[in-house]
Amino acid sequence: MSNGKHHDILLQGVRKFGSSAVFLVQLLIQCVPAFARPRLIVFQIYNTGARSLIIIMLSGLFVGMVLALQGFNLLQRFGSAEALGSAAAIGLLKELGPVVTALLFAGRAGTALTSEIGLMRATDQLVAMEIMAVDPLRYVAAPRFIGVVIAMPLLAAIFSVIGLYGAQLVGVQFLGVDQGAFWSQMQGAVSWHDVNQGFVKSLVFGVACSLIAVNEGYHAEPTAAGVGLATTRTVVASSVLTLLLDYVLTAAFL
Amino acid sequence: MVAVRDVHYAVDGRPIFSGASVIARRGRITAIMGPSGTGKTTLLKLITAQIQPDQGQVLVFGQDLARLQRHETYAVRKRMGMLFQNGALLTDMSVFENVAFPVREHTDLPETLVRLLVLAKLEAVGLRGAVELMPAELSGGMARRVALARAIVMDPEVLIYDEPFVGLDPISLGFILRLIKQMNVALGITSIVVSHDVQELSSIADDSYLLSDGKVEASGTPKELLASGNPAVRQFMTGSAEGPVRFQYPAPDYKTQMLSVEES
């Protein structure tokens, strides 16, 4: 590849990052008046959050179960199987809960948002709003953005709680870890600080995932292929950014 | 009311307009005609401030759109209505909510008043019975009539129609045609109609403009255009493929290309 092409790709990347940042600022400005219509936001919390509940709960259960299985296997070798409760809790609250929720969310709700907004663009609905003197950023983009940012921590919390019950199911009921030890170790090891870390992470992931989903949809090329491409980009960008941010945040917290 | 003055506009270096001027006078129906791809839709985008010209001015209600702040642009748009070719109805709302949308967004009218207003506008387009339907359940012609009801619900001073006759059956077409005229006569709405349906448009328009190659090729009353001696104008008004207006997209020589396909 020639040097010029590298430059082009770099330039494109910088431009994309810049336009996303500008979009975020415009979006945040429109979030203020968007709160004047709480009905729209509540609907989006239902649409993106409540409708993702089943996939989040099922995944949480299985992740918790696998965690217990692997954790038990490892901890038993050191004769500290009772620590399973605290290990599962820390793993779920600080890492798996926020990260897996964000990944699942990007696939389940992020894509839906992008294709919905992209199709609104393709069928002139966004332009029609503009002409009717209604800012689509305020009416369409902002409520979805706010909805996701509110829904994400809630979903991550539900994921972690269900995951803990999954771990308890396998660890205590199937593998015979002492029930009292499981919960009391957990209570002793987990501090509010850990819960907060998970909360902050899921909040940041919520902002990142919804910004990407809304931005991609809003700026999708108004064709069938363009909307499809934007949807794919949403999943890829959200997933990679979530994992990247996870590392950055973890490093910052330590 | 709406004046486009010597506008230049280019996309990716390809000029769409090079010095076009169009004036829509108060209370009249102005027809913008021209072959496909001459920038008719781009002209509407300029008038509705979706894009800004590279050179020249677009004045609406005497205000230069390029100099307006965002909220001022919105204030101008509140006095305009636009009918999109595909209707552009909001697909997640019923017909009623679609027509009520601008009212709910811009006023605090009580629900009973909103209902009366919406039903009256839907009655005007003959779709009061379709009030509970969703946009997906409407035919193309019905969707456009709902969109028209939505465009007039705020009683705009200027109403813009983008290709209002495309794909309509004769009954709907006649209905829309009469409606445009009626609203113009009864309510004094200034109307700008973009279309290439010469016959239909000529029957209602007061002034007409013929766009070609980024410029206004001819203007005047429909009668004057029909009687024009300009061969390009005559070609368009009579719908002939032969004439100064190029119908074929530029291509290499036909014979050479066909022979070279065989060789390769």
Image (cartoon, coloured by chain):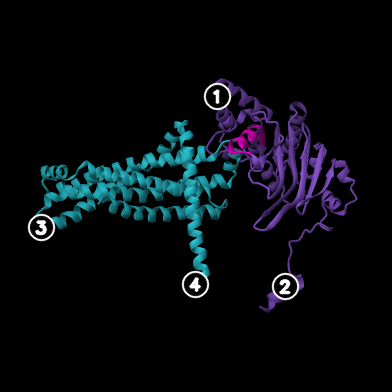
Chain colours: A cyan, B purple
Decide: is B185 above or below A118: above
The disc placed on residue A1 is 4
Q: Amino acid at mark 3?
A: Phe
Q: Which residues are magenta?
A: B68-81
Q: Nearer the viewer, mark 3 or mark 4?
A: 4
**Gap between marks 2 and 1, in whole Å?**
65 Å
Q: Are the residues under badges 3 and 4 in a single subunit?
A: yes
Does residue B150 appear to the left or right of B19 in the view shown?
left
Residue at image coords 67%, 28%: B155
Residue wearing tag 1 = B108
Residue wearing tag 3 = A78
- Reply yes or no: does residue B37 show up in magenta: no
Q: Nearer the viewer, residue A51 or A192?
A: A192
Q: Amino acid at mark 4?
A: Met
Q: Are the residues under badges 2 and 1 in a single subunit?
A: yes
Instruction: Give the structural element (helix, strand or loop) at label 4.
Output: loop
| First in residue order: circle 2 vs circle 1 | 1
**Gap between marks 1 and 3, in whole Å?**
69 Å
**Crowd tier of the residue under label 3, counting other residues whose Cα lies within 10 Å: few below 14, some 14–19, many 20 or above:** few
Q: Nearer the viewer, residue A97 or B237?
A: A97
- Reply yes or no: does residue B72 show up in magenta: yes
Q: Chain of mark 1?
A: B
**Gap between marks 3 and 2, in whole Å?**
79 Å
Asked whether disc 1 touches disc 4, contact meaning CB atoms under 8 Å apart, the reply is no
**Crowd tier of the residue under label 2, counting other residues whose Cα lies within 10 Å: few below 14, some 14–19, many 20 or above:** few
Does residue B254 appear to the left or right of A120 in the view shown?
right
**Percent coordinates x, y for residue A24 in the rendering:** 46, 46
